[in-house]
């Protein structure tokens, strides 16, 4: 009987420890100096922890430099927030076809026949196959995700062909240095409007290096518009004991952004990898921070109890926002989300 009680107490302790991640203390973040994979035109933040920074450095050594294009372009004329379409989409490392998606978006096929005046794509798992370094000995790399047309989906090439502004910050190398083609992958912002004042945040490292990115959208509006892309870890490091499905490390990655999230009007595209459901602490955190109510429609395109992808909105000028999942995945394993502020 005593051993049974001890086992029950031990299990209860594990559950309490895991479920307590809702109260996770925000990791301490600090500015990071430029160098290696970190260009000077980006503001960098990383955990203020020597061990974590050392691990991040090993992943950083395997990727190329960020791509920032379009910051020098003139801001677009004043545009209402409700006239801008925002897209969040995990393109699965070259499997998602960005060009036909943008063609359909520009034609109004995805917005009830009304072409958007302006749009911003907030993309996860974008691939870059041009200008890659050969790789540094000892550099960390992620397992390769393949796509038959991966070289065609090089994000910098797509930016030039579609005449869009681009912010691309790689998180990890896509396969080891000997893989062909050499590629890295990470988050990107593609926009019809100029992008500037870029911030990159290296999240506390769990399974892989993850870099959240934020940028200011160039409009002549008096209220600045900030956008961002966030992609949290899908699985934990193998060294950790898996007790329950509540994922404390995603809560830690989410709350690490607390001190660096943009203020004012903000739209975030996110793949949170919230496999454990709508009560995951990471999701609750973002819903508390981004206070503009956003109604999700077209939910049949996503599994109702396993939703991974989100658009988050915050604006004092607009009471509500909404977004919907596009049925066509355009080759990816995720549905694009299309959203906007209501009038």
Image (spheres, rainbow, N blue to C red):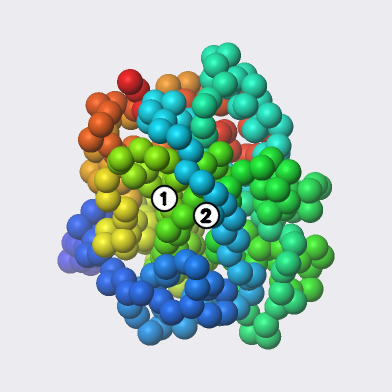
Instruction: Give the residue at x 66% y 63%.
Output: 184
Instruction: Give the residue at x 53% y 72%.
Output: 39
Quarter occupied by residue 257: bottom left
Location of residue 117 in the rendering, given as x and y in whole percent from the top left corner: 52, 27
Q: Quadrant of the C terminus?
A: top left
Q: CA distance from mark 1 to mark 2?
A: 9 Å
Q: Along the horizontal axis of the image, is 258 left or right of 308? A: left
Location of residue 78 in the rendering, given as x and y in whole percent from the top left corner: 40, 33
Circle on res. 272: none
Toward the viewer: 85 or 62? 85
Location of residue 320 in the rendering, given as x and y in whole percent from the top left corner: 29, 26
Q: Residue furthest top?
A: 113
Toward the viewer: 262 or 22? 262
Q: Which residue is mark 2?
A: 71
Q: Is residue 207 visible?
A: no
Quarter occupied by residue 128: bottom right
Q: Along the horizontal axis of the image, is 125 left or right of 342? A: right
Toward the viewer: 108 or 229? 108
Q: Quadrant of the N terminus?
A: bottom left
Instruction: Give the residue at x 41% y 50%.
Output: 216
Q: Which residue is mark 1?
A: 216
Q: Secondary structure at mark 1?
A: strand
Instruction: Give the residue at x 68% y 54%.
Output: 156
- The crowd level at tag 2 (other Cα within 10 Å; few <14, some 14-19, many 20+) is many
Q: Is residue 79 visible?
A: yes
């Amino acid at each position: 009987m005593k051993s049974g009680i001890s086992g029950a107490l031990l299990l209860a302790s594990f559950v309490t420890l895991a479920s307590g991640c809702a109260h996770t203390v925000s990791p301490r973040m600090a500015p990071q100096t430029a160098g290696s994979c970190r260009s000077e035109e980006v503001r960098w933040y990383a955990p203020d922890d020597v061990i974590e920074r050392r691990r991040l450095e090993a992943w950083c050594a395997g990727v190329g430099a960020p791509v920032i294009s379009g910051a020098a372009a003139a801001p677009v004329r004043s545009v209402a927030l409700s006239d801008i379409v925002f897209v969040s989409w995990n393109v699965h490392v070259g499997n998602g076809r960005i060009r036909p998606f943008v063609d359909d978006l520009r034609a109004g096929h995805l917005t009830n026949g009304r072409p958007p005046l302006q749009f911003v794509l907030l993309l996860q798992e974008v691939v870059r196959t041009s200008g890659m370094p050969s790789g540094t000995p000892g550099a960390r790399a992620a397992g390769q995700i393949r796509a038959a047309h991966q070289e065609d989906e090089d994000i910098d090439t797509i930016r030039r062909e579609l005449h869009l502004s681009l912010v691309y910050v790689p998180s990890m190398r896509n396969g080891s240095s000997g893989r062909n083609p050499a590629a890295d992958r990470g988050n990107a912002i593609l926009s019809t409007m100029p992008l500037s004042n870029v911030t990159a945040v290296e999240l506390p490292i769990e399974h892989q290096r993850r870099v959240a990115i934020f940028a200011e959208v160039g409009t002549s509006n008096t209220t600045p518009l900030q956008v961002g892309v966030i992609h949290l870890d899908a699985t934990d490091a193998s060294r950790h004991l898996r007790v329950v499905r509540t994922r404390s490390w995603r809560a830690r990655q989410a709350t690490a952004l607390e001190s660096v999230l943009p203020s004012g009007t903000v739209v975030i595209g996110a793949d949170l990898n919230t496999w454990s459901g709508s009560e995951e602490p990471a999701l609750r955190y973002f819903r508390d921070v981004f206070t503009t109510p956003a109604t999700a429609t077209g939910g049949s395109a996503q599994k109702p109890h396993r939703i991974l992808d989100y658009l988050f909105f915050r604006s004092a000028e607009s009471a509500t926002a909404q977004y919907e999942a596009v049925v066509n995945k355009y080759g990816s394993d995720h549905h694009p989300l299309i959203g906007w502020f209501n009038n």
